[in-house]
Image (tube, coloured by chain):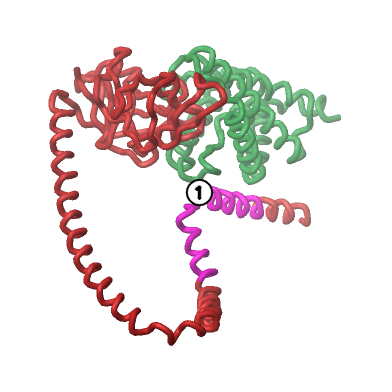
Chain colours: A green, B red
Amino acid sequence: MKNILVGIVSFIVFLIIYFLQINFFSWFNISGVKPNLFVILVLFLGLYAGQRNGLVLGIIFGLFLDMTMGRNIGISAIMLSIIGILGGYFDKNFSKDSRITIMLMAVGSTLVFELGSYLLNAMLLSYRIDILNFIRIVIIEMFFNMMLIIILYPLLKKVGYMLENMYKSTQVLTRYF
Amino acid sequence: MYKKKKGILGVVITTIILIILVFLTNVNTEKLSYIENVCNSLIMPIQNGITYIKNKINGNNSFFENISEIQEKNKVLQEENTKLEQSLRELEIIKAENTTLKEYLSLTEKYEEFKSIPAYIISKDVSNYSSVFVLNVGTDDGVENGMTVIADKGLVGHVISVTKSTAKVQTIIDSASNVSAKINTSNESISCKGVLSSKTLKATYIPNDAELISGDTVQTSGMGGIYPKGIHIGTVRKIVSTNNILDRYLEIEPAVNFETVETVLVITH
Protein backbone atom coordinates (compact mmCIF):
# COMPACT_ATOMS: atom_id res chain seq x y z
CA MET A 1 0.00 0.00 0.00
CA LYS A 2 2.79 2.36 0.99
CA ASN A 3 4.71 1.43 -2.12
CA ILE A 4 1.74 2.04 -4.40
CA LEU A 5 1.13 5.47 -2.87
CA VAL A 6 4.79 6.45 -3.24
CA GLY A 7 4.76 5.10 -6.77
CA ILE A 8 1.73 7.15 -7.79
CA VAL A 9 3.04 10.37 -6.22
CA SER A 10 6.48 9.97 -7.75
CA PHE A 11 4.92 9.23 -11.14
CA ILE A 12 3.02 12.52 -10.96
CA VAL A 13 6.29 14.28 -10.06
CA PHE A 14 7.92 12.46 -12.97
CA LEU A 15 5.29 13.77 -15.38
CA ILE A 16 5.78 17.31 -14.09
CA ILE A 17 9.54 16.94 -14.60
CA TYR A 18 8.93 15.51 -18.08
CA PHE A 19 6.98 18.58 -19.17
CA LEU A 20 9.48 20.90 -17.51
CA GLN A 21 12.29 19.18 -19.37
CA ILE A 22 10.56 19.52 -22.74
CA ASN A 23 9.10 23.00 -22.43
CA PHE A 24 10.81 25.04 -19.75
CA PHE A 25 14.40 23.86 -20.02
CA SER A 26 14.41 24.04 -23.80
CA TRP A 27 14.83 27.78 -23.38
CA PHE A 28 16.19 28.00 -19.82
CA ASN A 29 19.50 26.32 -20.67
CA ILE A 30 23.20 26.99 -20.32
CA SER A 31 24.61 27.33 -23.85
CA GLY A 32 22.09 24.88 -25.21
CA VAL A 33 22.57 22.17 -22.59
CA LYS A 34 19.59 21.04 -20.54
CA PRO A 35 19.88 19.63 -17.01
CA ASN A 36 18.71 16.10 -16.26
CA LEU A 37 16.07 16.13 -13.55
CA PHE A 38 15.16 12.47 -14.04
CA VAL A 39 18.50 11.46 -12.58
CA ILE A 40 17.91 13.69 -9.55
CA LEU A 41 14.42 12.22 -9.04
CA VAL A 42 15.53 8.59 -9.21
CA LEU A 43 18.60 9.24 -7.06
CA PHE A 44 16.35 10.90 -4.49
CA LEU A 45 13.97 7.93 -4.50
CA GLY A 46 16.88 5.52 -4.12
CA LEU A 47 18.30 7.56 -1.26
CA TYR A 48 15.15 8.05 0.78
CA ALA A 49 12.67 5.36 -0.28
CA GLY A 50 15.11 2.47 -0.40
CA GLN A 51 17.16 0.67 -3.01
CA ARG A 52 14.37 -1.61 -4.20
CA ASN A 53 11.94 1.25 -4.79
CA GLY A 54 14.63 3.24 -6.58
CA LEU A 55 15.35 0.28 -8.84
CA VAL A 56 11.71 -0.44 -9.71
CA LEU A 57 10.70 3.18 -10.24
CA GLY A 58 13.90 3.80 -12.23
CA ILE A 59 12.97 1.00 -14.61
CA ILE A 60 9.38 2.25 -14.95
CA PHE A 61 10.40 5.87 -15.62
CA GLY A 62 13.17 4.78 -17.96
CA LEU A 63 10.79 2.61 -19.99
CA PHE A 64 8.36 5.52 -20.19
CA LEU A 65 11.11 7.80 -21.50
CA ASP A 66 12.23 5.18 -24.01
CA MET A 67 8.68 4.71 -25.28
CA THR A 68 8.06 8.42 -25.77
CA MET A 69 11.42 9.74 -26.90
CA GLY A 70 14.01 7.01 -27.35
CA ARG A 71 14.93 4.98 -30.38
CA ASN A 72 16.05 1.83 -28.57
CA ILE A 73 13.78 0.64 -25.82
CA GLY A 74 15.66 -0.13 -22.63
CA ILE A 75 18.65 2.19 -22.55
CA SER A 76 17.20 4.82 -20.19
CA ALA A 77 15.53 2.03 -18.22
CA ILE A 78 18.86 0.29 -17.60
CA MET A 79 20.69 3.50 -16.75
CA LEU A 80 17.97 4.90 -14.46
CA SER A 81 17.72 1.57 -12.61
CA ILE A 82 21.49 1.72 -12.07
CA ILE A 83 21.02 5.23 -10.63
CA GLY A 84 18.33 3.84 -8.29
CA ILE A 85 20.72 1.12 -7.09
CA LEU A 86 23.47 3.73 -6.68
CA GLY A 87 21.07 5.80 -4.56
CA GLY A 88 20.53 2.85 -2.22
CA TYR A 89 24.27 2.26 -2.06
CA PHE A 90 24.93 5.92 -1.19
CA ASP A 91 22.23 5.72 1.50
CA LYS A 92 24.04 2.85 3.22
CA ASN A 93 27.50 4.39 3.06
CA PHE A 94 27.16 8.16 3.38
CA SER A 95 25.36 10.66 5.56
CA LYS A 96 22.57 12.58 3.88
CA ASP A 97 22.62 15.50 6.29
CA SER A 98 25.16 17.55 4.40
CA ARG A 99 24.31 19.51 1.30
CA ILE A 100 27.70 18.87 -0.22
CA THR A 101 27.39 15.07 -0.12
CA ILE A 102 24.03 15.24 -1.90
CA MET A 103 25.54 17.60 -4.47
CA LEU A 104 28.44 15.24 -5.11
CA MET A 105 26.08 12.26 -5.34
CA ALA A 106 24.01 14.10 -7.95
CA VAL A 107 27.11 15.04 -9.96
CA GLY A 108 28.43 11.48 -9.84
CA SER A 109 25.17 9.87 -10.85
CA THR A 110 24.66 12.36 -13.68
CA LEU A 111 28.09 11.40 -15.00
CA VAL A 112 27.29 7.68 -14.73
CA PHE A 113 23.92 8.09 -16.44
CA GLU A 114 25.13 10.22 -19.33
CA LEU A 115 28.28 8.19 -19.97
CA GLY A 116 26.34 4.93 -19.93
CA SER A 117 23.47 6.08 -22.10
CA TYR A 118 25.77 7.79 -24.60
CA LEU A 119 27.99 4.73 -24.97
CA LEU A 120 25.02 2.35 -25.29
CA ASN A 121 23.38 4.62 -27.87
CA ALA A 122 26.65 4.99 -29.74
CA MET A 123 27.00 1.22 -29.94
CA LEU A 124 23.42 0.59 -31.05
CA LEU A 125 22.99 3.51 -33.46
CA SER A 126 26.57 3.68 -34.81
CA TYR A 127 27.32 7.25 -33.77
CA ARG A 128 30.68 8.69 -34.64
CA ILE A 129 31.88 9.23 -31.07
CA ASP A 130 32.66 12.88 -30.50
CA ILE A 131 34.63 12.99 -27.26
CA LEU A 132 35.30 16.73 -26.92
CA ASN A 133 31.70 17.78 -27.47
CA PHE A 134 30.52 15.02 -25.18
CA ILE A 135 32.83 16.15 -22.36
CA ARG A 136 31.64 19.72 -22.80
CA ILE A 137 27.98 18.70 -22.56
CA VAL A 138 28.55 16.43 -19.58
CA ILE A 139 30.47 19.04 -17.61
CA ILE A 140 27.83 21.71 -18.18
CA GLU A 141 25.08 19.24 -17.35
CA MET A 142 26.75 18.14 -14.11
CA PHE A 143 27.20 21.76 -13.12
CA PHE A 144 23.57 22.57 -13.93
CA ASN A 145 22.33 19.59 -11.91
CA MET A 146 24.54 20.62 -8.99
CA MET A 147 23.05 24.12 -8.98
CA LEU A 148 19.54 22.70 -9.13
CA ILE A 149 20.35 20.48 -6.14
CA ILE A 150 21.51 23.52 -4.18
CA ILE A 151 18.24 25.29 -4.96
CA LEU A 152 16.03 22.26 -4.32
CA TYR A 153 17.90 20.98 -1.25
CA PRO A 154 15.53 22.34 1.47
CA LEU A 155 12.55 20.78 -0.31
CA LEU A 156 14.35 17.49 -0.93
CA LYS A 157 15.36 17.27 2.71
CA LYS A 158 11.84 17.86 4.00
CA VAL A 159 10.15 15.41 1.63
CA GLY A 160 13.00 12.97 2.09
CA TYR A 161 12.60 12.79 5.85
CA MET A 162 8.87 12.32 5.44
CA LEU A 163 9.51 9.39 3.10
CA GLU A 164 12.13 7.94 5.36
CA ASN A 165 9.82 8.06 8.36
CA MET A 166 7.21 6.20 6.37
CA TYR A 167 9.60 3.39 5.55
CA LYS A 168 12.05 3.20 8.39
CA SER A 169 10.17 4.38 11.47
CA THR A 170 10.89 1.13 13.32
CA GLN A 171 14.57 1.15 12.44
CA VAL A 172 15.45 4.65 13.54
CA LEU A 173 16.86 3.62 16.90
CA THR A 174 19.14 0.95 15.52
CA ARG A 175 20.32 3.23 12.78
CA TYR A 176 21.29 6.33 14.67
CA PHE A 177 22.23 5.22 18.19
CA MET B 1 18.26 30.25 13.18
CA TYR B 2 21.56 31.49 11.79
CA LYS B 3 22.12 28.28 9.90
CA LYS B 4 18.65 28.37 8.39
CA LYS B 5 19.14 31.94 7.17
CA LYS B 6 22.46 30.98 5.66
CA GLY B 7 20.80 28.11 3.79
CA ILE B 8 18.14 30.35 2.30
CA LEU B 9 20.80 32.88 1.31
CA GLY B 10 22.69 30.11 -0.48
CA VAL B 11 19.57 29.12 -2.38
CA VAL B 12 18.88 32.70 -3.44
CA ILE B 13 22.48 33.32 -4.53
CA THR B 14 22.57 30.08 -6.53
CA THR B 15 19.30 30.92 -8.24
CA ILE B 16 20.60 34.34 -9.23
CA ILE B 17 23.87 32.86 -10.52
CA LEU B 18 21.95 30.26 -12.51
CA ILE B 19 19.69 32.86 -14.10
CA ILE B 20 22.67 35.06 -14.96
CA LEU B 21 24.50 32.09 -16.49
CA VAL B 22 21.50 31.10 -18.59
CA PHE B 23 21.06 34.67 -19.74
CA LEU B 24 24.73 35.16 -20.59
CA THR B 25 25.13 31.94 -22.54
CA ASN B 26 21.98 32.53 -24.57
CA VAL B 27 22.50 36.18 -25.34
CA ASN B 28 22.72 37.03 -29.03
CA THR B 29 26.00 38.38 -30.29
CA GLU B 30 23.89 40.84 -32.27
CA LYS B 31 22.64 42.33 -29.06
CA LEU B 32 26.23 42.85 -27.92
CA SER B 33 26.65 45.34 -30.76
CA TYR B 34 24.44 47.65 -28.71
CA ILE B 35 27.21 47.94 -26.13
CA GLU B 36 29.69 48.34 -28.97
CA ASN B 37 27.60 51.23 -30.25
CA VAL B 38 27.68 52.93 -26.87
CA CYS B 39 31.47 52.59 -26.68
CA ASN B 40 31.86 53.84 -30.23
CA SER B 41 29.61 56.83 -29.76
CA LEU B 42 31.75 57.87 -26.81
CA ILE B 43 34.99 57.71 -28.75
CA MET B 44 34.06 58.54 -32.33
CA PRO B 45 33.33 62.31 -32.07
CA ILE B 46 36.69 62.97 -30.44
CA GLN B 47 38.47 60.72 -32.93
CA ASN B 48 36.70 62.48 -35.80
CA GLY B 49 37.78 65.88 -34.55
CA ILE B 50 41.38 64.81 -34.13
CA THR B 51 41.48 63.29 -37.62
CA TYR B 52 39.95 66.43 -39.12
CA ILE B 53 42.56 68.65 -37.51
CA LYS B 54 45.36 66.31 -38.54
CA ASN B 55 44.21 66.29 -42.18
CA LYS B 56 43.91 70.08 -42.23
CA ILE B 57 47.47 70.48 -41.01
CA ASN B 58 48.86 67.90 -43.45
CA GLY B 59 46.99 69.13 -46.54
CA ASN B 60 47.66 72.85 -46.01
CA ASN B 61 50.64 72.97 -48.37
CA SER B 62 48.82 71.88 -51.53
CA PHE B 63 45.38 73.25 -50.72
CA PHE B 64 45.46 76.42 -52.88
CA GLU B 65 47.62 75.14 -55.74
CA ASN B 66 45.30 73.50 -58.24
CA ILE B 67 41.80 74.33 -57.13
CA SER B 68 40.37 75.09 -60.60
CA GLU B 69 41.65 71.80 -62.01
CA ILE B 70 40.01 69.90 -59.22
CA GLN B 71 36.68 71.66 -59.77
CA GLU B 72 36.62 70.65 -63.43
CA LYS B 73 37.42 67.06 -62.59
CA ASN B 74 34.68 67.08 -60.01
CA LYS B 75 32.06 68.11 -62.57
CA VAL B 76 33.02 65.33 -64.99
CA LEU B 77 33.01 62.72 -62.25
CA GLN B 78 29.61 63.79 -60.98
CA GLU B 79 28.06 63.38 -64.41
CA GLU B 80 29.59 59.96 -64.74
CA ASN B 81 28.33 59.04 -61.32
CA THR B 82 24.71 59.86 -62.10
CA LYS B 83 24.87 57.78 -65.29
CA LEU B 84 26.33 54.80 -63.44
CA GLU B 85 23.78 55.00 -60.68
CA GLN B 86 20.96 54.96 -63.19
CA SER B 87 22.24 51.84 -64.90
CA LEU B 88 22.84 50.17 -61.54
CA ARG B 89 19.23 50.67 -60.55
CA GLU B 90 18.03 49.20 -63.82
CA LEU B 91 20.25 46.19 -63.29
CA GLU B 92 18.98 45.66 -59.77
CA ILE B 93 15.40 45.60 -60.95
CA ILE B 94 16.26 43.02 -63.59
CA LYS B 95 18.14 40.94 -61.01
CA ALA B 96 15.23 40.85 -58.58
CA GLU B 97 12.87 39.86 -61.36
CA ASN B 98 15.24 37.13 -62.41
CA THR B 99 15.53 35.58 -58.93
CA THR B 100 11.78 35.53 -58.33
CA LEU B 101 11.20 33.89 -61.69
CA LYS B 102 13.89 31.32 -60.96
CA GLU B 103 12.38 30.56 -57.57
CA TYR B 104 8.96 29.94 -59.05
CA LEU B 105 10.44 27.67 -61.65
CA SER B 106 12.49 25.55 -59.25
CA LEU B 107 9.74 25.29 -56.63
CA THR B 108 7.19 23.96 -59.04
CA GLU B 109 9.73 21.59 -60.49
CA LYS B 110 10.89 20.38 -57.10
CA TYR B 111 7.80 19.75 -55.06
CA GLU B 112 5.18 19.08 -57.69
CA GLU B 113 5.33 15.32 -57.59
CA PHE B 114 5.21 14.93 -53.80
CA LYS B 115 1.96 14.45 -51.89
CA SER B 116 2.22 15.60 -48.32
CA ILE B 117 0.45 15.72 -44.94
CA PRO B 118 0.83 18.85 -42.81
CA ALA B 119 1.81 18.30 -39.15
CA TYR B 120 2.72 20.17 -35.97
CA ILE B 121 5.74 19.38 -33.81
CA ILE B 122 4.28 18.64 -30.39
CA SER B 123 7.45 17.85 -28.47
CA LYS B 124 11.19 17.91 -28.83
CA ASP B 125 13.81 15.70 -27.25
CA VAL B 126 14.50 15.64 -23.50
CA SER B 127 18.15 14.63 -23.69
CA ASN B 128 21.18 16.56 -24.88
CA TYR B 129 22.56 13.93 -27.22
CA SER B 130 19.86 13.33 -29.73
CA SER B 131 17.50 15.42 -31.77
CA VAL B 132 14.11 13.74 -32.13
CA PHE B 133 10.76 15.42 -32.75
CA VAL B 134 7.28 14.06 -32.11
CA LEU B 135 4.56 15.03 -34.61
CA ASN B 136 0.81 15.12 -34.08
CA VAL B 137 0.02 12.78 -36.98
CA GLY B 138 0.07 8.98 -36.97
CA THR B 139 -1.11 5.89 -38.80
CA ASP B 140 -4.68 7.25 -38.73
CA ASP B 141 -3.57 10.10 -40.99
CA GLY B 142 -1.62 7.80 -43.30
CA VAL B 143 1.88 8.28 -41.92
CA GLU B 144 4.18 5.28 -42.14
CA ASN B 145 7.63 4.35 -40.97
CA GLY B 146 10.49 5.77 -43.04
CA MET B 147 8.57 8.66 -44.60
CA THR B 148 10.44 11.88 -45.31
CA VAL B 149 9.66 15.05 -43.35
CA ILE B 150 10.31 18.51 -44.79
CA ALA B 151 9.69 22.09 -43.66
CA ASP B 152 9.10 25.12 -45.83
CA LYS B 153 12.81 25.70 -46.40
CA GLY B 154 14.19 22.19 -46.68
CA LEU B 155 14.75 18.71 -45.31
CA VAL B 156 13.95 17.96 -41.64
CA GLY B 157 14.37 14.21 -41.28
CA HIS B 158 12.51 10.92 -41.52
CA VAL B 159 9.92 9.05 -39.45
CA ILE B 160 11.48 6.34 -37.28
CA SER B 161 8.45 5.07 -35.42
CA VAL B 162 4.76 5.75 -35.57
CA THR B 163 1.73 5.17 -33.35
CA LYS B 164 -1.97 5.78 -34.00
CA SER B 165 -1.78 9.51 -33.45
CA THR B 166 1.91 10.42 -33.15
CA ALA B 167 5.07 9.96 -35.18
CA LYS B 168 8.69 10.16 -34.03
CA VAL B 169 11.05 11.94 -36.41
CA GLN B 170 14.82 11.63 -36.40
CA THR B 171 16.18 14.96 -37.65
CA ILE B 172 19.18 15.29 -39.95
CA ILE B 173 21.23 17.04 -37.23
CA ASP B 174 21.00 13.99 -34.96
CA SER B 175 24.29 12.14 -34.42
CA ALA B 176 22.82 8.93 -35.77
CA SER B 177 21.58 10.53 -38.98
CA ASN B 178 23.35 10.10 -42.29
CA VAL B 179 22.02 11.65 -45.50
CA SER B 180 23.29 10.91 -48.98
CA ALA B 181 23.54 14.27 -50.72
CA LYS B 182 25.05 16.05 -53.71
CA ILE B 183 26.42 19.49 -54.36
CA ASN B 184 24.24 21.40 -56.80
CA THR B 185 26.80 23.09 -59.06
CA SER B 186 29.27 20.26 -59.49
CA ASN B 187 26.98 17.23 -58.96
CA GLU B 188 29.54 15.61 -56.63
CA SER B 189 27.94 13.18 -54.21
CA ILE B 190 28.75 13.47 -50.50
CA SER B 191 27.45 12.09 -47.22
CA CYS B 192 26.08 14.47 -44.56
CA LYS B 193 26.29 13.40 -40.92
CA GLY B 194 24.86 15.08 -37.84
CA VAL B 195 27.33 16.41 -35.29
CA LEU B 196 26.82 16.19 -31.52
CA SER B 197 25.64 19.46 -29.94
CA SER B 198 26.06 21.58 -33.02
CA LYS B 199 23.50 22.81 -35.49
CA THR B 200 25.61 22.10 -38.57
CA LEU B 201 26.15 18.97 -40.64
CA LYS B 202 29.49 17.45 -41.47
CA ALA B 203 29.88 16.26 -45.05
CA THR B 204 32.48 13.59 -45.73
CA TYR B 205 33.45 11.17 -48.52
CA ILE B 206 34.17 14.05 -50.87
CA PRO B 207 35.73 13.00 -54.20
CA ASN B 208 39.40 14.02 -54.44
CA ASP B 209 38.96 16.09 -57.59
CA ALA B 210 35.77 17.81 -56.50
CA GLU B 211 35.62 21.58 -56.96
CA LEU B 212 34.21 23.07 -53.78
CA ILE B 213 32.86 26.58 -53.31
CA SER B 214 31.51 27.83 -50.01
CA GLY B 215 27.97 29.09 -50.46
CA ASP B 216 26.98 26.23 -52.75
CA THR B 217 23.62 24.63 -52.09
CA VAL B 218 23.32 20.94 -51.21
CA GLN B 219 20.37 18.66 -51.94
CA THR B 220 19.51 15.02 -51.39
CA SER B 221 20.82 12.65 -54.03
CA GLY B 222 18.10 10.02 -53.77
CA MET B 223 20.57 7.23 -53.03
CA GLY B 224 20.13 5.13 -49.90
CA GLY B 225 16.42 4.69 -50.22
CA ILE B 226 15.18 6.90 -47.37
CA TYR B 227 14.98 10.38 -48.87
CA PRO B 228 13.63 11.16 -52.34
CA LYS B 229 15.85 13.00 -54.80
CA GLY B 230 16.14 16.78 -54.99
CA ILE B 231 15.15 18.06 -51.55
CA HIS B 232 17.09 21.11 -50.42
CA ILE B 233 19.31 20.44 -47.36
CA GLY B 234 21.34 23.62 -46.86
CA THR B 235 24.38 25.58 -47.97
CA VAL B 236 28.12 24.92 -47.67
CA ARG B 237 29.38 27.20 -44.93
CA LYS B 238 33.00 26.21 -44.60
CA ILE B 239 35.49 23.96 -46.38
CA VAL B 240 37.91 22.37 -43.94
CA SER B 241 40.98 21.01 -45.68
CA THR B 242 43.36 18.72 -43.79
CA ASN B 243 46.83 17.37 -44.56
CA ASN B 244 45.36 14.37 -46.24
CA ILE B 245 42.93 15.20 -49.03
CA LEU B 246 40.84 12.12 -48.20
CA ASP B 247 40.04 13.54 -44.77
CA ARG B 248 38.76 16.93 -45.82
CA TYR B 249 35.19 17.76 -44.92
CA LEU B 250 32.53 20.44 -45.36
CA GLU B 251 30.45 22.18 -42.75
CA ILE B 252 26.93 22.48 -44.04
CA GLU B 253 24.41 24.89 -42.59
CA PRO B 254 20.91 23.36 -42.74
CA ALA B 255 18.27 25.54 -44.37
CA VAL B 256 15.79 24.70 -41.60
CA ASN B 257 16.26 26.30 -38.19
CA PHE B 258 15.69 23.33 -35.89
CA GLU B 259 15.16 25.47 -32.80
CA THR B 260 12.25 27.48 -34.13
CA VAL B 261 10.60 25.12 -36.63
CA GLU B 262 7.00 24.32 -35.69
CA THR B 263 5.10 23.10 -38.72
CA VAL B 264 6.34 20.45 -41.12
CA LEU B 265 5.13 18.35 -44.03
CA VAL B 266 5.29 14.56 -44.16
CA ILE B 267 5.82 13.32 -47.70
CA THR B 268 3.80 10.22 -48.57
CA HIS B 269 5.47 8.28 -51.35
In the rendered image, the vertical position of residue B64 relative to residue B184, given as above or below: below
For the residue pair B135 and A16, the one nearer the viewer reads as: B135
User: What is the span of residues highlighted in magenta in the rendered image?
Assistant: B12-40
Amino acid bearing label 1: Asn
How many discs mark residues in the rendered view? 1
Left or right position of B180 against A125: left
Residue B177, given in percent of the width and then of the height, sits at 41, 21
In the rendered image, the vertical position of residue B176 relative to residue B3, given as above or below: above
Q: Quadrant of residue A110?
A: top right
Disc 1 marks which residue? B26
Disc 1 packing (10 Å; few <14; some 14–19; many ≥20): some
Residue at the outermost bottom position: B64
Q: Quadrant of the C terminus of chain B?
A: top left
Q: Which residue is pictured at 34% across the width and 17% down the height?
A: B161
Q: Is residue A67 visible?
A: no
Q: Can residue A25 be seen in this view?
A: yes
Q: Which residue is pictured at 30% across the width and 23% down the height?
A: B187
Q: Which chain carries label 1?
A: B
Residue B27 belongs to the span the image colors magenta: yes
Residue B200, given in percent of the width and then of the height, sits at 44, 33
